[in-house]
Image: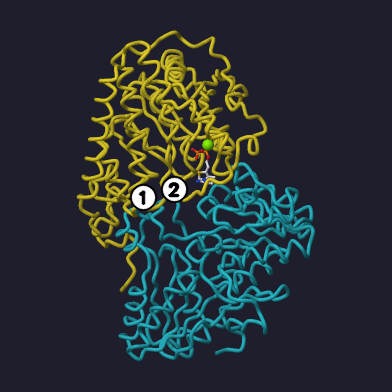
Amino acid sequence: MTETDTTLLPPERPDAALMLQMYESMVLIRRFEERAAEEYMKGHIGGFLHLAIGEEAAVVGSISALRPDDPITSTYREHGQALARGSDPKRVMAELFGRSTGICGGLGGSMHLMDVERHFYGGYGIVGGSIPLAVGLGFAISYREGDSVAMAMFGDGATNQGVLAESMNMAALWKLPVIFFVLNNHYGMGTAIDRASADTDLFKRAEAHGMPAKQLDGMSVLAVYRGVLEAARLAREERQPSMIEARAYRYRGHSMSDPDTTRADEEKERWEARDPLVTFERVLYGEGTLTAETAEAVRASVETQVEEAVAFADESPPVPEADLARHVYAHPWSEDPRGSAVVPR
Amino acid sequence: MSTKAASAPAASPGAAKPVSYREALTQAMREEMQRDPSVFLMGEDVGRYEGAFKVTRGLLREFGERRVVDTPISEAGFVGLGIGAAMAGLRPIVELMTVNFSIVAMDQIVNNAAKVRYMFGGQVACPLVVRMPGGAGHQLAAQHSHSLEAWFAHIPGLKVAAPATPFDAKGLLKAAIRDDDPVIFLESEGLYAKKGPVGGPDELVPFGRAAARRAGSDCTIVAISRMVWITLSAAEELAKEGIECEVIDPRTLRPLDIETLAASVRRTSRAVIVEEGWPECGVGANLAARLYEECFDDLDAPIARVSSADVPMPYAKNLEMAALPQPADVVAAVRRTLGAR
Ligand SMILES: Cc1ncc(C[n+]2csc(CCOP(=O)(O)OP(=O)(O)O)c2C)c(N)n1
Ligand SMILES: [Mg+2]
């Protein structure tokens, strides 16, 4: 585990209230995903289900360091992003169930959550595909002379798509307020990072674009928080895009359909020993921010939220079939529910 | 049936037990890699992980890392690399994890693979196979449910195969690997577990030969890839009412065996085309145009098309079912066609 370049990190620590909020968010994400896995096994959730269990510190630490109006993009592994941004767990679960009450009306599913009100600009399924969208969101901020910051969140695997280099160059060239946040969980599906990347220090990709970058312990929510806080300051105040590499691990297989046979147990255990929730709990206990009582209250509240989310999803109505073509265009030119290309029948 | 319609050849005597479409593909690659040392396989998770759909199971063990290469997630890069290696005389089989990711590599496929022979006046060949599974039906939503047959079939310089059976999966893939031109090999996710007989090591299925999957004299149904099976169950349904459909599987879209398709339509005077892609500018649109040109005077009714709905694929199961062609849609299309009698 390397933690390079922590010297430049600002000393800021979130205040006690924010620390507790971050803790609760991490617990919520963990439990939400564990429950989602159960519902998937029961056949209530279809398609792919990618869990970020083990990656909660990277998700929550980064998002907590941003303002709520800083737009973010993500991948298909994005339940945590939505929840960390404050999306209603009920509507997120309903989306996983493919119901009309889902956050995208049941059209997107687990891989394609979006909550535009909360400036979460979506989870995308094509590896690397969402990175330039964040650059576009940054461009729009710059264009309107706003002071928010866009953050692209993507995996280690995505760094080998050409579009990342294209995106970083444009952001640097035009001084756009963008953070390139790579959540390095050391695997792209079954392929370990050292079998896919010639240089596994992913943050070094920024150097070629004259961009500052940091490699952080992605199992530590505070390390991630501080790193992203500084990146956000750079972007907001100096129009300086930068890159953050957070090193973490996903405990489960790539998705629910991955038998996960290529990763060594010993490796999994090594990472799980540094579990982000347990580590953070220890810090909070040490500081007196968390007591056994508050921890219990957090867990109980999360349990209720998650159970309510499942019940809500389960009781929600299906998506009306008449909606099949509803959102294809702003102004559809055909009333045919099978789409705008009307085939004589 | 026209003589050219090589209806699925009977399994060779003593042929082994039925194998899955997946295993048929593995056999084709294994046999061709054994036969020709210039054949190698490259793609995401094709080696240690043995393929996202386990089509490359056992190949790394047998052929080693020199010939079974795990790539980074860099589709434009490694498809382009495959083209370069093919120009240098190797015979790459490049696996794209799914058809959806070919979109990232489309520039390499369309601007390079399809063009190098022609624009350099025949100086180089591009004996490349790009394999990829496509299709919907697993609630994978808008970005992971594409059927892009029409995109590839549009491009002069490419050959396009879309096998529906284990026999064709094996025979066409072997033919594709031996072909001197770039082949886009479209597998169907929904068919990997489908079992059937396959041919032996030297049985190739030639490109440009359609196969009759069912005989009938009331209506011709042309069906592509997985839609062959949807269509066959629709045909059984219709047979109960005494409507006998002839089901034709083109097997390759480029080259296209228009003669076999037209011969069937001339006999039945009616045609329905079933595809999983979208209706606008799709395979069905093209086949309908070709059939009108070939046998307009023989038709007793307008050609009907069955396709996916003209929408991105929705996630919700009920909407996905509504968007995808179902046997009932084929039945309805055939009835419509006959109603115009
Ligand atoms: C362009 C593209 N190629 C392949 C895939 C199939 N695929 C889905 S996720 C994945 C691994 C991505 O790894 P990484 O970027 O590290 O993200 P992680 O899944 O680890 O969060 C692959 C190969 C895809 N979705 N898009
Ligand atoms: Mg990864």
Which residue reaches farthest front?
A: A292
Q: Earlier in the sequence, mark 2 or mark 1?
A: 1
Compared to B150, does A304 lie above or below?
above
Q: Position of residue B10 (x, y in %)?
A: 61, 84
Parent chain of label 1 = A
A213 to the left or right of A45 = right
Q: Position of residue A50 (x, y in %)?
A: 43, 43
> Do the dots labelled 2 and 1 sit on one chain?
yes
**Residue at left 57%, top 24%?**
A203
Position of B36 relative to B43 (above/below): below
Q: Residue shown at 47%/40% (left/top)?
A: A252
Q: CA distance from mark 2 to mark 1?
A: 8 Å
Q: Quadrant of the N terminus of chain B?
A: bottom right
The amino acid type, in three-letter code, at marker 2 is: Met
Residue of label 2? A256
Q: Looking at the picture, how far across and down is residue B309, in whole percent?
A: 35, 62
Q: Quadrant of residue A11?
A: top left
Dividing the picture into quarters, in which one does residue B179 lie? bottom right
Judging from the image, mark 2 belongs to the subunit labelled: A
Of B166 and A217, nearer the camera is A217
Q: Are marks 2 and 1 in contact (CB under 8 Å)?
A: yes
Q: Residue furthest top?
A: A11
Q: Which mark is residue A40?
A: 1
Q: Colour of chain A?
A: yellow
Image side of residue B199 versus residue A9, left or right: right
Q: Is residue A7 above or below residue B311?
A: above
Residue under the point 72% across and 55% down: B40
**Chain in cyan (letter):** B
Is the CB of the residue bearing disc 2 within 8 angstroms of ligand 1?
no
